[in-house]
Image (spheres, grey):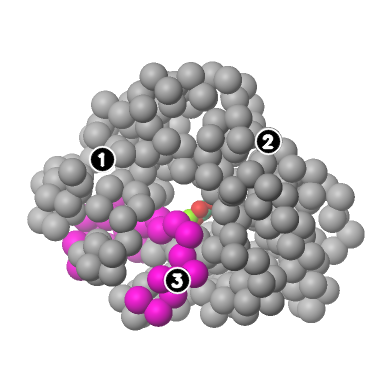
Amino acid sequence: MKFSANLGFLWTDRGMPDAIRAARSAGFAAVECHWPYETPATEVAEALVETGLPMLGLNTRRGNVAAGENGLAALPGREAEARAAIEEAVDYACAIEARKIHVMAGFASGPEAHRCFIGNLRFACKIANRYGLTILIEPLNRYDASGYFLTTTDQSVTIIEEVGAPNLKLMFDCYHVQVMEGDLTRRLKNLLPLIGHIQFASVPDRGPPDRGEVAYDHIFRTIADLGYAEPLGAEYKPDGDTDASLGWMKTTEGMGGRIQS
Ligand SMILES: O=C(O)[C@H](O)C(=O)CO
Ligand SMILES: [Mg+2]
């Protein structure tokens, strides 16, 4: 069991190359990010080579963030922008050797949005397949992303089956899944073949995993027992300094200190 530092939330006080170095110093086995596009890919690639850490994945652009957009792929009429964002993400991922792209659906609902998302995901999977990349979809919870198109693992399974591409997988963020559906242990077991990445944070406050309503020592043990060996994404919001929030990696029984090797 290894951990990946999500640089969308951890070490946000520095640029991405330095955040990658900080993650290495803290003992993470990998990094992942949200929207790296303001940083030249060459700078990110250099920091990855220097530290020896892989960048696991990144997200497609959200669209007009100032106007509150949170993804484009399920927005009927916005297919050209959505597909340009997918192509941009594929290019960036190839430049830094990231293997996974989270295609963000956006705020939408109804059958047209569903059809639009399916079409854009088929497009994404086809391009990604040329480079051996995996496309991820991630259900987000109704409080943090009210009105987001994709909200549950059940809905995600329907979409993955309908798209029918072997390189389309589920981003299982334990934080969102716990808020929306619960039953984490059974869901992890049942959905394992469809899972392309796992993330975690405390519930309900999205802090470090050693507090809140989810017993992450049990969840991490469950994941390890299932034979899932990819790094788990630490996608939580530290109360302040990221380094000061990492006690869970060293001290909590069953967590990083014991499991990470
Ligand atoms: O918010 C999350 O959980 C994500 O993983 C993300 O990629 C941005 O919404
Ligand atoms: Mg997440």
In terms of sequence position, does the residue under pointer 3 or pointer 1 come before the other? 3
Q: Name the kind of residue labelled 3 in the image.
A: Pro
| Rendering quarter of residue 72 | bottom right
Answer left or right for 104 relative to 205: right
Say which of marks 3 and 1 sits in front: 3
Circle 2 SS class: helix
**Residue occupied by mark 2:** 91
Q: Name the kind of residue labelled 1 in the image.
A: Ser
Circle 1 SS class: helix
Mark-to-mark CA distance, 3 and 2: 27 Å
**Residue 84 image offset from top left, x and y in percent:** 79, 44
Answer left or right for 84 relative to 246: right
Few, some or many residues within 10 Å of mark 1 (<14, 14–19, 20+): some
Q: Is residue 247 above or below residue 51?
A: below
The reply to whether residue 180 is visible in this rendering is yes
Q: Label 2 near label 3: C-beta < 8 Å? A: no
In terms of sequence position, does the residue under pointer 2 or pointer 1 come before the other? 2
For the residue pair 105 and 83, the one nearer the viewer reads as: 83
**Residue occupied by mark 1:** 245
Residue pictured at 54% horizontal, 19% vertical: 43
The reply to whether residue 234 is visible in this rendering is no
**Residue occupied by mark 3:** 193
User: The magenta stretch spans which residues?
Assistant: 189-218
